[in-house]
């Protein structure tokens, strides 16, 4: 699984979580965890957070953005802004595109 597929899969999972939290908030379903009632307003917050993570997963998973970030890391590593141990973690397939 490459980075794009992983990001899109994570985005899809977070989208499902966001929809479930939205459904709970709109329907007012009660939830209790080990005897403690979870308030409905917590679902609104969870919906916003999960929705933001879903959006990031879908948009960050674009191949052009991954390539651009990799090229930026390569340029920083070449300039000495990143220590050698970290720069060695940069994705090798994107080196020729920079």
Image (spheres, rainbow, N blue to C red):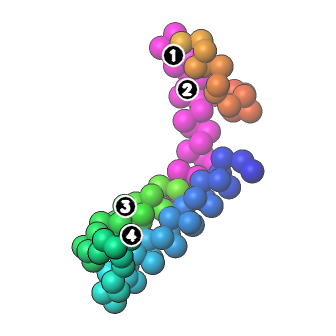
Which mark lies nearer to you, 4 or 1?
4
Q: Distance between the residues labelled 2 and 1?
A: 8 Å
Q: What stretch is highlighted in magenta?
A: 58-82
* Residue topped by disc 1: 82
Q: How far apart are marks 2 and 4 (CA)?
A: 46 Å
**65 drawn magenta:** yes
User: Is 62 placed above or below 46 here?
Assistant: above
On residue 73, the disc is 2
Label 2 CA crowd tier, 10 Å (few <14, some 14–19, many 20+): many
Q: Where is residue 28 in the image (x, y as percent from the top left)?
A: 30, 87
Q: Is mark 2 on a helix, strand or loop?
A: helix
Residue beneath the point at 51% across and 16% down: 82
User: Is 26 placed above or below 81 here?
Assistant: below
Is there a contact, CB below 8 Å, between mark 4 and mark 3? no
* Residue topped by disc 3: 49
Q: Is mark 4 on a helix, strand or loop?
A: loop
**First of labels 2, 4 by sequence position:** 4
Q: Distance between the residues labelled 3 and 2?
A: 28 Å
- Residue 61 is left or right of residue 41, and the answer is right
User: Is 48 placed above or below 96 here?
Assistant: below
Q: Where is residue 71 in the image (x, y as percent from the top left)?
A: 59, 30
On residue 34, the disc is 4
Which mark lies nearer to you, 2 or 4?
4
Q: Quadrant of the C terminus?
A: top right
Residue beneath the point at 59% across and 12% down: 84
**First of labels 4, 1 by sequence position:** 4
**First of labels 4, 3 by sequence position:** 4
């Amino acid at each position: 699984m490459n980075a794009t597929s992983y990001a899109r899969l994570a985005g899809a999972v977070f989208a499902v979580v966001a929809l479930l939290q939205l459904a709970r908030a709109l329907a007012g379903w009660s939830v209790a965890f080990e005897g403690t009632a979870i308030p409905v307003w917590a679902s609104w917050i969870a919906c916003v957070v999960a929705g933001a993570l879903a959006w990031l997963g879908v948009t960050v998973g674009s191949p052009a953005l991954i390539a651009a970030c990799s090229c930026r890391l390569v340029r920083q590593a070449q300039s000495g802004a990143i220590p050698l141990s970290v720069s060695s973690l940069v994705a090798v397939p994107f080196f020729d595109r920079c």
